[in-house]
Image (spheres, rainbow, N blue to C red):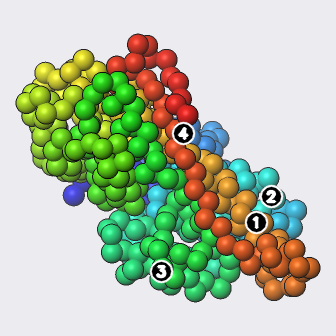
Amino acid sequence: MRESAAERHDRLLALVRERGTARVSELAVRLGVSPVTARRDVEALAGRGLLERVHGQVSWPGGAERAAGHGGGPAAPGGGPVLGLLAPSATYYFAEVIRGAREAADRARARLILRISDYRPEEDRARTEGLLAAGAEGLLVAPGWRAPGDQAEHGEWIAGLPVPAVLLERRAEPGSALDGLDRVSSDHRHGVLLAVRHLVGLGHGAPLLVARADTPTALAVRAGYARALDVLGLAAPGPVVDSVPAEVEPEGFEAAVRALREAVASGAVTSALVHNDVDAIQMVQRLSELGVRVPDDLALIAYDDEVAALADIPLTAVAPPKRLVGRLATELLVEKLAAGGGRGGAAAGDGAEDAAADARRHVTLLPALRVRASCGAVAAETRSEPA
């Protein structure tokens, strides 16, 4: 199976994180790609604030001391806590989550260290143990769950962590051991409802859902779609179309495009919700080649709003508050550490401090809908619909 750009980006970030600083030519050799490809990847990651470029070299943002993900390391500047962040990826969706966490850590004078599971939930525990070995006093945990059963099979250990932990952009099953943990997440069901309601308000019937099934967000979008139809009293125009990455499974992607095209050609649908942005952009391009025009023949909304605005026809998109999720989760973790006595978390405080340390919070943030041209907007000007 050919490696995707996102997987290559994660390998590149891991190499820089291990070394602190690396030359682009060295990265090209280690990644097994051409210098041009390595340079393009570095530019893309630097543009998102995930790397810093200086005279042919790249480094981890904030200097090499931030890159330490193993073997301990110095305490945070200003005596703040050391925070560990486990993420399934450092690109696409989670790039903004990580950026928000880093901004909050900087404001708290905390040191943030990162480890990436690459959506391999069986490796989450070992990666987290590495963060603890590196001195993490509190943890932000976004497990690499992919399938519905991954939480039960690979997640129960999180409830027994020896330091305060906050689940990041993940929801625990009700009644599970993880349901008692602090968490900060986006309400994807609400995001889907915004999209469906908007399309119906434009005069369309229920949109057809085209979605992946390989991440918690994708599964939440699917669940939110069924709920939105129920809330609005709508019937699904057809079965959910299963989507896959075009660069990984081109035949599966083509099948998804043709299923959507047939639904439009038959008159069954005039609108669609597509998860995610990259799939949506590529589908619009392929649909055009097959004679289906967006938005004339098909009104389309993407889910994620990472690159939706950059499409030839700017895509209306549901935008989860990714950066805010990272920021608020980090602020919550810092608060928990401070209320629990700072480093080590064992010191007893007064009654108010004890209450703050013991309280658990489930913070849910609402996505916004960014309205652009792909759903039939009069102009490509972006506007946000209230949640």
Secondary structure type for disc 1: helix
The one nearer the camera, 363 or 1, is 363
Mark closer to the observer (3, 1): 3
* Quarter of the image that includes the N terminus: bottom left
Crowd band around label 3 with a 10 angstrom C-alpha radius: few (<14), some (14–19), many (20+) = some
Mark closer to the observer (1, 4): 4
The answer to whether 307 appears left or right of 108 in the picture is: left
The answer to whether 13 appears left or right of 280 in the picture is: right
Q: Which residue is mark 2?
A: 108
N-terminal of the pair, mark 1 or mark 4, is: 1
Determine whether label 3 and label 1 are within 8 Å by CB: no
Crowd band around label 1 with a 10 angstrom C-alpha radius: few (<14), some (14–19), many (20+) = many
Above or below 32: residue 137: below
Crowd band around label 2 with a 10 angstrom C-alpha radius: few (<14), some (14–19), many (20+) = some
N-terminal of the pair, mark 2 or mark 4, is: 2
* Identity of the residue drawn at 37% across and 28% down: 201
Q: Furthest residue to the front?
A: 233
Callout 2 amino acid:
Ala
Q: Which residue is mark 4?
A: 387
N-terminal of the pair, mark 3 or mark 1, is: 3
Crowd band around label 4 with a 10 angstrom C-alpha radius: few (<14), some (14–19), many (20+) = few
Q: Residue 31 occupies which quadrant of the picture?
A: bottom left
Above or below 152: residue 234: above
Estimate the spatial distance between the alpha carbons at disc 3 and disc 4, rounded to whole Å: 29 Å
Q: Which residue is mark 1?
A: 334
N-terminal of the pair, mark 3 or mark 4, is: 3
> Residue 64: image x %, image y %?
68, 58
Q: Which residue is mark 3?
A: 176
Above or below 11: residue 71: below
Callout 4 amino acid:
Ala
